[in-house]
């Protein structure tokens, strides 16, 4: 892949790759910590739902407050867990595009699109 590349370019690419791996590792560590906190809150919310079902017929105020709290927790799960996971997918997609572009640039193989058969339109 890097047969035609200068040694400096290879060093820069390897350094960038190491930095990217460290950044992704740091990001995933933060994400896991936040997911753990959010899932703990979800367990508490699950207990609140069970209590809510038990008290549903007795106390309207309690039911109203609990439903609002459950909505806040679900919003927090969406914000703290699902949105960062979408970001991780975007990071891997950009990395895949970068590697594919570099591989294509330094590849000795010919592009397959140059050899597509021409159709006869007559």
Image (cartoon, rainbow, N blue to C red):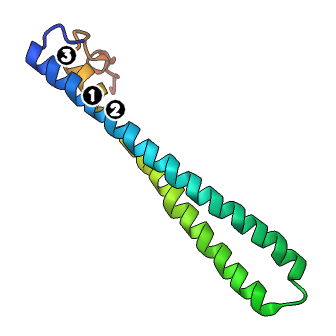
Q: Give the percent coordinates (x, y) of residue 77.
A: 57, 62
Marks 2/3: CA–CA distance = 22 Å
Q: What residue is pinned by disc 1?
A: 17
- Foreground tag (2 vs 3): 2
Residue drawn 28% across the image and 28% down it = 18
Is 64 situated left or right of 27 in this image? right
Disc on the earlier residue, 3 or 1: 1
Question: Do the residues under discs 1 and 2 have CB atoms within 8 angstroms?
Answer: yes
How many discs appear?
3
Marks 3/1: CA–CA distance = 17 Å
Q: Which mark is residue 21?
A: 2
- Whether residue 89 appears in this view of the structure is no
Marks 1/2: CA–CA distance = 6 Å
- Foreground tag (3 vs 1): 1
Q: Nearer the viewer, residue 118 or 61?
A: 61
User: Relative to residue 62, is residue 113 depicted above or below?
Assistant: above
Residue drawn 33% across the image and 18% down it = 116
Q: Secondary structure at mark 3?
A: loop
User: Relative to residue 75, is residue 91 depicted above or below?
Assistant: above
Q: What residue is pinned by disc 3?
A: 106
Q: Give the percent coordinates (x, y) of residue 67.
A: 71, 80
Disc on the earlier residue, 2 or 3: 2
Q: Give the percent coordinates (x, y) of residue 78.
A: 55, 62
């Amino acid at each position: 892949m890097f047969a035609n590349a200068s040694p400096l370019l290879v060093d820069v690419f390897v350094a960038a790759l190491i930095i990217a791996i460290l950044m992704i590792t740091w990001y995933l560590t933060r994400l896991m910590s936040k997911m753990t906190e959010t899932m703990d809150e979800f367990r508490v919310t699950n207990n609140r739902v069970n209590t809510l079902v038990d008290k549903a017929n007795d106390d309207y105020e309690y039911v109203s407050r609990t439903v609002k709290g459950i909505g806040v927790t679900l919003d927090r799960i969406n914000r703290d867990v699902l949105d960062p996971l979408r970001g991780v997918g975007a990071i891997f997609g950009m990395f895949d595009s970068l590697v594919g572009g570099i591989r294509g640039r330094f590849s000795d193989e010919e592009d397959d699109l140059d050899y597509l058969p021409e159709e006869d339109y007559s």
